[in-house]
Image (cartoon, rainbow, N blue to C red):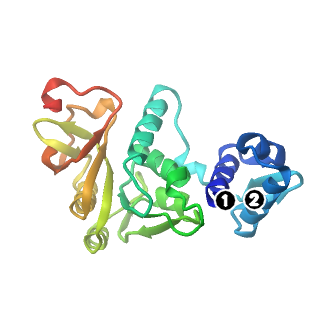
């Protein structure tokens, strides 16, 4: 239970930049002494900076690459991310590619109570080719992080190329979570370009289950690079009901 509580306290600090002992006690229904011990434990791991009466973010800038959006789109991404995390069990090895929606999935994976072992230790392994996702997860004590090699694509923070493809090809994943640009009944799942598609294909091929996350704007849209057919998708998570052709 304490490991789960520490993750929640860390999430509170990251959400607002700082937190007080009183806020921790009110939110988590613990004593002031317990709240202080939790903040001290996080400070000892260099995850927060202890302040008088509370703690502040340690300056790692987690929220810069993974900052949530605003409005209906952000609400849709948050809802989809929550649905994806329900597909993941403690102990799973999860592959995640880059993109704004999968970044929100990473945020949820980092804070989901059911993925934090009550007695401490590793509860989840995440394999990613996205630098922003890796940056956000690297200090989470319950997450074992594996980052592929490859060439950085500045626009998307993703690693691509032969090194990324080969690294994924040597792994076995329980779940691949793929953010995509298009899903249609004619061409299946598609990506913006062939480099992104190659790594996503490798993640799908290495996984026992493939979860595709696509907002309603991507439904019945065909992006330039084919990724995989609909038969290769186990779960489609979206925020808008698909039309009859895609649903069939």
Q: Is residue 41 left or right of residue 183?
A: right
Q: Quadrant of the N terminus?
A: bottom right
Q: Quadrant of residue 170?
A: bottom left
Instruction: Indicate the position of residue 229 as horizontal and vertical percent values.
Output: 13, 47
Q: Is residue 221 above or below residue 124?
A: above
- Real-space Cα separation, disc 1 to disc 2, in angstroms: 8 Å
* Closest to the observer, 71 or 142: 142
The residue where tag 2 is placed is 38
Q: Could you tell me which secondary element the residue under label 2 belongs to?
A: helix
Which class describes the residues within 10 Å of circle 1: few (<14), some (14-19), or many (20+)? some
The answer to whether the residues at label 1 and label 2 have Cβ atoms under 8 Å apart is yes
Q: Is residue 87 left or right of residue 63?
A: left
Q: Is residue 52 above or below residue 42?
A: above
Q: Is residue 62 above or below residue 247?
A: below
Instruction: Indicate the position of residue 31 as horizontal and vertical percent values.
Output: 82, 49
Q: Which mark is residue 194?
A: none
Q: Which mark is residue 2?
A: 1
Residue at 51%, 49% (x, y): give it: 107
Q: Quadrant of residue 159?
A: bottom left
Q: Is residue 154 left or right of residue 245?
A: right
Residue at 55%, 51% (x, y): give it: 113
Instruction: Indicate the position of residue 230 as horizontal and vertical percent values.
Output: 15, 44
- Please state which of the two labelled residues, at mark 1 or mark 2, is closer to the viewer: 1
Residue at 38%, 45% (x, y): give it: 84
Which is more N-terminal, label 2 or label 1?
1
Q: Quadrant of the C terminus?
A: top left
* Closest to the observer, 157 or 25: 25
Instruction: Indicate the position of residue 180 as horizontal and vertical percent values.
Output: 29, 45
């Amino acid at each position: 239970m304490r490991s789960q509580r520490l993750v929640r306290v860390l999430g509170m600090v990251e959400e607002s930049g700082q937190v007080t002992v009183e806020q921790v006690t009110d939110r988590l229904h613990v004593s002031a002494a317990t709240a202080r011990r939790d903040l001290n434990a996080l400070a000892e791991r260099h995850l927060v900076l202890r302040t008088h009466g509370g703690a502040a973010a340690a300056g790692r800038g987690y929220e810069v690459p993974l900052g949530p959006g605003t409005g209906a789109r952000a609400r849709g991404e948050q809802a989809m991310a929550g649905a994806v995390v329900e597909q993941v069990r403690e102990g799973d090895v999860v592959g995640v590619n880059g993109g704004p929606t999968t970044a929100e999935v990473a945020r949820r994976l980092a804070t989901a109570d059911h993925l934090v072992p009550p007695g401490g230790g590793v509860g989840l392994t995440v394999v990613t080719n996205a630098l922003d996702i890796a940056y956000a997860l690297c200090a989470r004590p319950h997450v074992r992080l594996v980052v592929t090699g490859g060439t950085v694509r500045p626009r998307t923070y993703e690693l691509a190329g032969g090194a990324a493809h080969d690294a994924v090809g040597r792994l076995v994943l329980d779940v691949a979570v793929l953010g995509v640009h298009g899903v249609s009944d004619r061409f299946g799942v598609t990506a913006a370009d062939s480099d992104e598609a190659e790594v996503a294909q490798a993640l799908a091929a290495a996984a026992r289950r493939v979860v595709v996350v696509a907002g309603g704007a991507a439904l019945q849209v065909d992006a330039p690079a084919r990724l995989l057919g609909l038969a290769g998708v186990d779960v489609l998570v979206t925020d808008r009901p698909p039309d009859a052709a895609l649903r069939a």
